[in-house]
Image (spheres, rainbow, N blue to C red):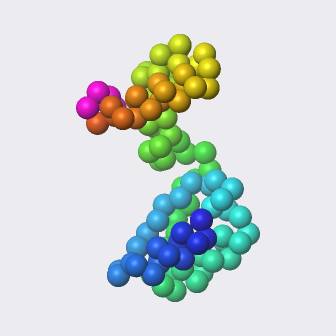
Amino acid sequence: MIVFFDKFVENITKKTVVVLDNSSLHTSKKFKEKIKEWEELDLLIYFIPPYSPELNLIEILWRFVKYKWLKFEAYTSFENLKLNLNDVLNGFETKCIINF
């Protein structure tokens, strides 16, 4: 993550805000040590409150995938899960609807 943000900050041309969850990748000591340096380069890091699935769009998407779009049979094997998940994600824009 640090390498990604180091490269990302090289390409920004204006003040930029990145919103992150509290994953261990984002809260490690090394990552936190870099935040001040990135801020000086106009990259601002904002952390959502701990356990805020309603603020994390991937959590909302995953809830729909798990409980609405994946059939129960998808969980019978890892290979079956991969195939079914791939089908859901490939058809996301055309077949799947999220109502907020």
Closer to the camera in the image, 70 or 63: 70
Which residue is outermost to the bottom?
Answer: 40
Residue 90 in percent (x, y) is at 36, 35
Residue 63 seen by the camera: no
Residue 86 seen by the camera: yes
Does the magenta portion include 46? no
Residue 95 in percent (x, y) is at 29, 27
* Position of residue 96 in the picture relative to residue 31 (left or right): left
Q: Residue at x 48, y 61 (%)?
A: 19
Q: Residue at x 53, y 30 (%)?
A: 82
Q: Main secondary structure of the magenta part?
A: loop
Residue 18 in percent (x, y) is at 46, 65
Q: How many marks?
A: 0
Which residue is outermost to the top?
Answer: 73
**41 to 71, vertically: above or below:** below
Q: Residue at x 47, y 25 (%)?
A: 84
Closer to the camera in the image, 87 or 36: 87
**79 to 93, vertically: above or below:** above
Which residue is outermost to the left?
Answer: 94
Closer to the camera in the image, 17 or 68: 68
**34 to 4, vertically: above or below:** below
**77 to 43, vertically: above or below:** above
Does the magenta portion include 97? yes
Q: Which residues are magenta?
A: 94-98
Q: Residue at x 40, y 28 (%)?
A: 87
